[in-house]
Image (tube, rainbow, N blue to C red):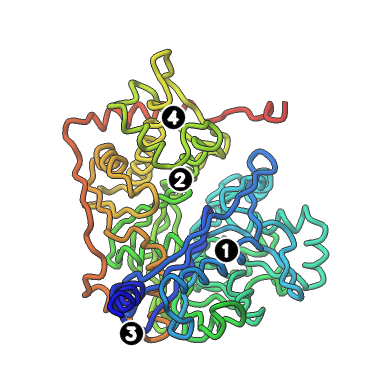
Amino acid sequence: LPLIFFFFFFSRGGGGGGPYFGSIDQGTSSTRFIIFDAKLTPVASHQLNVKQHYPHPGWADMDANEIMESINICATEALQKSGILASEIKAVGVTNQRETTVIWDKNSGDPLAPAMLWFDDRTKSLCHRITNELGGDPQVLQQKSGLRINPYFSAFKLRWLIENNENIKKAVDAKAAAFGTVESYVIWKLTGGHHHVTDCTNASRTMLMDLNSLEWCEELCNTLGIPMDKGLLPEKIVSNAEPEAFGTIQTGVLKGVKICGAIGDQQSALVGQHCFEKGQLKNTFGTGQFLLLNTGDDLVISDKGLLSTVAYRMGTEVAPTYAVEGSVAISGVGIKWMIEQMGFGESPTDIIDLASSVESTKGLYFVPAFNGLMAPHWTESARGIMIGWTHYHGRSHLSRALVEALCFQCRDVIEAMGLKPELIKVDGGVCQSDFAMQLLANLTEIPVERPANVETTALGAAIAAAIGCGHVARIEELEKKESVDEGTRFQPSASIDAAGKYSKWGEAVKRCEGWDLSHADD
């Protein structure tokens, strides 16, 4: 009897009590379902990898059906691990890879095409055409949308699918198609098609929402060729924390549980890191790398290659908090490339071990511009380059050059922000490496802090759900709590010539730009 009690006690998070909150964290590389207790401490989780498909150079797809299957499996397994019943979960929050575009049939719920991933760049020629039509400035719509004309954003993916997929075009004309980013599709499916909504953080990444009004913008839709009269867009843009707007789950193991929160993954990490004060900064190392700086109620429009976005809005009665963002395409996906394409190891740990086995790259620089460069450069013509190769160099030096590239790209964004923050708060897969985070501190010359719980993205969605259902009255309550452990801090080393190395990195970046891809199909 004591042994049974011991197992049951600790399977429920070491004695943490209900009510419980579920977090669906649907990312580019994996899906997670994490259960949090009443103090928003993680109790149990399950993770499942999801596949990406690359049918042509620059294209990146995902099966939307696989997304839903992975969510159901992860929720089932997490509940089983915890010993918690679905009826004990008070609310669920959803966080997701942003910009990724799904179009589905309103009647059957079936996807009409593979989900087009956020870093897919097949819309490059479309973006060039639109830019030229609008006078040649890719930032011409930034005052309203906060964004620049670029394949990254959902509006261009949506228009490309309508123009190039005959089945989608017919469904749109018949008002039988629905569009959404991943959270919108997930909520629609989980609620049995009763709720076609999106939240303000995800909507702010489509380039179709007015950042001031937080509503679909007729001018932006017309300019970008997206019809507003076909019932295609989500019916409502709502805040990140709502008691009723997202609906109740109708199928699967979570049937009967209310969805009370939804928030884009990078904004969710900002919330999970408790970056609630203006001037606080976080960097998430996921598939890509994303730095968000809280700008409070100031909507700051950058002229340095950064994006303006909604950071969060926790309820209809509060004003939105804004952020500026630097989005970098390559982080974890670069490590994955080294494993799968180069055969340098079998896991991310192998790549980090290789990188840490040498004291320097010995002059080797690697710019992983696989699909061009994003913030702050926004150079679509760039492609990956390794420069400084000699007979001396091996896979360990190349692995270290990739890890250093992640750090340099972070510094690129911080330099564009025009400030030197007191601290970089980090989360995501790569940040679990002490070696990589010490290197980040050294090469940015800024202290780095890693929380004890690095799954801050899932925590942000749980916070949204807790506020949405009334368990937490407002986000200010969380500022007073010590629920985010300070974790581990890495101080910069004065022995590193960070400025000199960063200058050489800048030279490598310039050399990778303007590459002619006319030979790509040879």
Residue found farthest to the left:
494
Query: Which residue occupies 39% across, 53% down?
Result: 428
Dot 3 or dot 2, earlier in sequence: 2
Dot 1 or dot 4, earlier in sequence: 1
Could you say where residue 515 lies in the image, as x and y percent from the top left?
A: 58, 28
What secondary structure is found at the residue carrying circle 1?
Answer: helix
Residue receiving disc 2: 332
What secondary structure is found at the residue carrying circle 3?
Answer: loop
Dot 2 or dot 1, earlier in sequence: 1
Nearer the observer: mark 1 or 3; the answer is 1
Query: Dot 2: few (<14), some (14–19), or many (≥20) neighbours within 10 Å?
Result: many
Q: Amino acid at mark 2?
A: Gly
Residue receiving disc 4: 366
What secondary structure is found at the residue carrying circle 2?
Answer: helix
Residue receiving disc 1: 70
**Residue 226: which numbered mark, if any?**
none
Circles 1 and 3: CB atoms closer than 8 Å: no
Q: Amino acid at mark 1?
A: Ser
Query: Which residue occupies 53% across, 61% down?
Result: 205
Nearer the observer: mark 1 or 4; the answer is 1
Query: Which residue occupies 55% across, 53% down?
Result: 140
Report, in whole angstroms, how far the alpha carbon at label 1 lies from the one at label 3. Answer: 32 Å
**Residue 473: which numbered mark, if any?**
3
Up/down of 294 relative to 435, above or below: below
Dot 4 or dot 3, earlier in sequence: 4
Nearest the camera: 180 or 19?
19
